[in-house]
Image (tube, grey):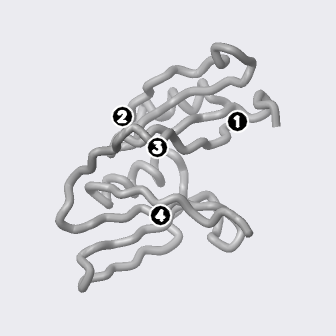
Amino acid sequence: MRLLHTMLRVGNLDRSIAFYTQILGMKVLRREEFPDGKFTLAFVGYGGERDHTVLELTHNWDTESYDLGNAFGHIAIEVDDAYAACEKVKQAGGTVTREAGPMKHGKTVIAFIQDPDGYKIEFIQKGTAGY
């Protein structure tokens, strides 16, 4: 078994694709339209679906926003430099919700940003985590 993808419902697919590709550097792997179901799926990631876990962005054509609730936590992405990654996000107009720095009770350097729909994304600086 292996983890294939995480699905996120998004209100504006083009806006979300721009965020994940232009700001986070992912690639659009495939996009499928389902006119009868009135939804579109776009798969984005850093590598192909056969070898990597990816994100499935689901856009229901009649829904502009979602209540994110309080159960989902975040997506984590390893970055070479969390400080530089936050700066890049800010320069691109993105939102940093927790600046880069060591965890409160540890040494792992982390930061949090937010995608256009409000989903949290954690940056974990390579070489600082305990794995």
| Label 3 SS | loop
Q: Which mark is residue 93?
A: 2
- Residue type at the position of mark 4: Glu
Give the percent coordinates (x, y) of residue 121. Answer: 51, 39
Q: Residue furthest front?
A: 71
Q: Quadrant of residue 75?
A: top right
Q: Quadrant of residue 42?
A: bottom left
Q: Are marks 1 and 3 in contact (CB under 8 Å)?
A: no
3D distance between C-alphas at marks 2 and 1 = 21 Å
Question: Foreground residue, 39 or 80?
Answer: 39
At x 62%, y 43%, the residue is: 77
Screen quadrant of the N terminus: bottom right
Closer to viewer: mark 2 or mark 4: 4
Question: Foreground residue, 22 or 41?
Answer: 41
Q: Which residue is mark 1?
A: 80
Q: Which residue is mark 4?
A: 56
Q: Which residue is mark 3?
A: 72
Closer to viewer: mark 2 or mark 3: 3
3D distance between C-alphas at marks 1 and 4 = 24 Å
Mark 1 or mark 3, which has the lower sequence index? 3
Mark 2 or mark 4, which has the lower sequence index? 4
At x 44%, y 41%, the residue is: 71
Q: Are marks 2 and 1 in contact (CB under 8 Å)?
A: no
Closer to viewer: mark 3 or mark 4: 3
- Residue type at the position of mark 1: Asp
Mark 3 or mark 4, which has the lower sequence index? 4
